[in-house]
Structure formats: C-alpha cells, structure tokens
Amino acid sequence: MPAKPSLADKLKSLGVRPASDLAPVSSPQGTPAKKAASGSSIDAVVDGRFVQTRLGETFVSEQVYASDYRHGSAPITVNAPLTMLSAWAQEPRFADLPLEAYAFLDTETSGLAGGTGTYAFLVGAARFVEGEFRLAQFFMRDPSEEPALLEGLADFLAPCGALVTFNGKAFDAPLLVTRYTLHSIPLPFKDYAHLDLLPLARRLWRDRLPSRALKYLEENVLNAPRTTEEVPGYEIPYLYFDYLRTGDANPLKGVFYHNAMDVVAMAALLRHTSTILHDPFSELVEHGLDEIALAKLFEALGTWDMAARLFERGLEMNLPEADFWQAIQRLSRLQKRRGDMETAVRLWEQAAGQGHVYAHVELAKYQEHTLRDYPSAMKWTESAMQLVAEQDLPRYVYNHWMEELGHRRERLQGKCAPKTEEH
C-alpha cells in the first residue's frame, strides 16, 4: 500500500519550497494540528471548534451580530425592498426572496490566479437567522481537510437560495465550483441567484472614488475603517504557506479578521445600496456625483421621470465643472426623449453659451426639424463649425464634426435658397 504524501510533498505540489525542519500540521486522521515549537495551533489563536462532517473534520469559527449592529454608519440588516436592485441585476428572484435566504460569502485562497492549482483555505459565510447575522468561517489546517471544509460549507448554505459576493462571479464562485467538482461533491449554490456587489459599486462610485475595493468602500461610503488587526489581501497566501511550514497559527488571526470584515461589509453594503436604490433622495446620498450616478442608473433602467429628477437634484449639488456639463448634456438628451423640448432647449442654450459643440448641433436640429426655421438652423450650424475649428480636438473628432456639419449646412443652404416662381 503506497505511503500517504507528507506535508513536504503537499507543499511541493503547491509550488512551495518547505523548510528543512517541517513538522506535520495534521495527522492522517485529521486530528488538531500539533502546537509548533514557537507558536500555537489554530484553536489556541482563533475562537472556534472542530466540526465533524461526512468527509472529515474541519475547524469553524463562529460569530453572531445582533440585528441592531452597525458597520461604521451602516446597519447590516436590510430593510428596504430589493425591487430596483433586482431590476438592475436582471434577477427577479432578488425581489421575492426573504432576507434569510441570502448567503454572504468570501474566500481567502492560496493564490489569485484561480484554476485547479488554487484552493480556498478559509471561507467566510454568513446568513440571517431570526434577525441575527451569523458568520461561520471554515478553515482547513491542511490541504487534506479540503473535502471536510467544502462539506461543512455546503451544510451551512443549504437553507439559502441566493449568494451575495464582492467580485464573486469572477473569482470566488468559479473557484469553489472547481474545488467541489474536483472532490465530486455536489455544488451547494448551483441554482442560487447570485448578486455580485462589485459591478454595482463601480456603477455608483466610479466617478467619485479612485478605488472601488471593498475596504476602500468601507472607509469612504460606510465610514467603517478597519483596526490594526487587518492584513493586506496580497499577504494572505504567504501567511498561510508560512503556517503550513511551521504550524504556528498566530499570524492567521489577522487573516480571520480580514475575512470576517469582508463578509460583514457585504451585508452593510447591501443595506446601503438597496436603501439608496429604493429611495435615491435619501439623506444617505450626500454627494452630487453619487446623485448623478443614480440618475444614470435609473435612466438605463428606463425609469426616465425619476432619472430626470435625479439629474436635476445632482446639478443643484456641488459638482466639478466637467461633470456638471456632462450631466447637463445627459439631462438634455433625456428630456428630449421624454418629449420635454422646452427644458431640453433651455439646457442646450445654457451649454451653447459655454461653447459646447453638441448644444449648437442640437439647437440646429431643433430649429430645422421642429420649428422649420432654416435661417436659425443655419446660424447654429455655422457657429458649431466655428467652434470645432477653434478648439484643439483630436483629428478623428474634428473630422466627425466637420463632416456632419458640412452635410447639414449644404442641406440648409438648399432650404434657405429663395424659390423661383414657376410660369
């Protein structure tokens, strides 16, 4: 009977060169890791317990957050309807599922590349149970415990019907699909609705915030800075490999904290985003760029009346000049689609006074096609051509405008020419 692979063999298979004095992290029977000569086992560092699953033993750390817990300035209990969020995500189930059906999930992995060579050594998952937010972190002390971790996670997710992640559609979910497949374990979230909060965060804050990383959103949207326990995400794989080498779990305390805060932050972010999508005039929306972002989102969803009101509210707030005029342009075109030409013309005239070419072109179109005032249309066309000639535009932009405006001027010359009487 072939000998079972040693820890050194496992590390080598993962591309890690082990130290010469490696001690085993777990026995073949999956018993708790031995205490290192200069450190501690995981259960001495992190509050938790060893849970026996159908496929072996895994370590689980559990925390409970009361219903009134706030992550920074944001509660974590969602109390707004998810109707608009459901419409944005194009997933009708989000609007119908109870809060208890949502599972919040984040993984800490042996690398960031994904694929069969990457595994999740720590998985944080949480769900609401009787109003409380219950977080469970599943940890494998040794790669041989991966099936037990996956089985324990499956049991935890069993009552749910939706998954909430942050960049999970691109990373966490595909990674777990691979791991469950490799071990021939049924995927627990196969038919779940999946809400990835990262695309929504990009949509809402890409114009105002330089980063949409979860930690940055915590600090700048949720007002929830992390403590000194936090460890940078890029260090986490190396900390785990060090643990495998030495058996010393002390450095992993910060990894558990990092993972827990990621999961809790998702709940707080879901509360915040669902609230402002349900009520975009909420006092939670304090910045003009955020209001404009909401206006664009509602416009994309076809809720034009609400979008117009949000654009107008955003324009009344403190906007950078370039963003102000971009919002004017968006609002003017929206009003044109809505049939409110009076407001659209007023906005075009305002923008034209500041030298915006598109506004001159829109006024030319309005005068030609709606009012049939061809001399006025010619005036706006020629003023637009003059602006294009005076501005330092990229050649392709210059050519685009001049070609379009040249055709328009030629057509208007024919319409403006006096007609000769037929005898």
Image (spheres, grey):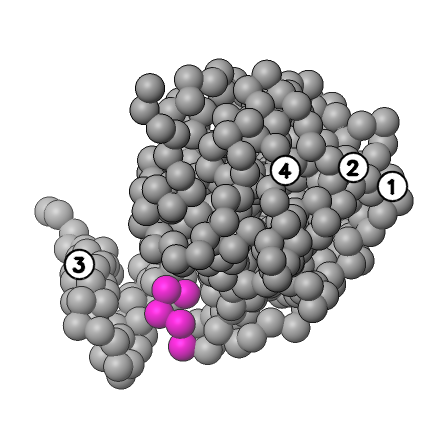
Residue matched to label 4? 32
Q: Give the distance between the C-alpha atoms of the residues marked 3 and 2, in whole angstroms.
A: 64 Å
| Mark closer to the observer (3, 1) | 1
Dot 3 amino acid type: His
Measured Cα–Cα span from mark 4 to mark 2: 28 Å
CA distance separating discs 4 and 1: 31 Å
Neighbor class of circle 4 (other Cα within 10 Å; few <14, some 14-19, many 20+) is some
In magenta, the rendered stretch is 355-359
Horizontal and vertical percent position of residue 163:
59, 30
Proximity of marks 4 and 2: CB atoms separated by less than 8 Å: no
- Relative to 16, is 33 above or below? above
Is 357 magenta? The answer is yes
Which secondary structure, mark 1? loop
User: Circle 3: is it few (<14), some (14-19), or many (20+) Cα within 10 Å?
Assistant: few
Q: Which mark is residue 422?
A: none
Number of numbered discs overlaid on the protein picture: 4
Distance from the alpha carbon under mark 3 to that under mark 1: 67 Å
As measured in the structure, the alpha-carbon distance from the residue carrying label 1 to the one carrying label 2 is: 6 Å
User: Of 412 and 391, which appears nearest the observer?
Assistant: 391
Q: Which residue is mark 1?
A: 66
Q: Could you say whether the residue bearing mark 4 is in a helix, strand or loop? A: loop
Residue that mark 3 sits on: 407
Which residue position is annotated with label 2? 133
Magenta span contains residue 147: no
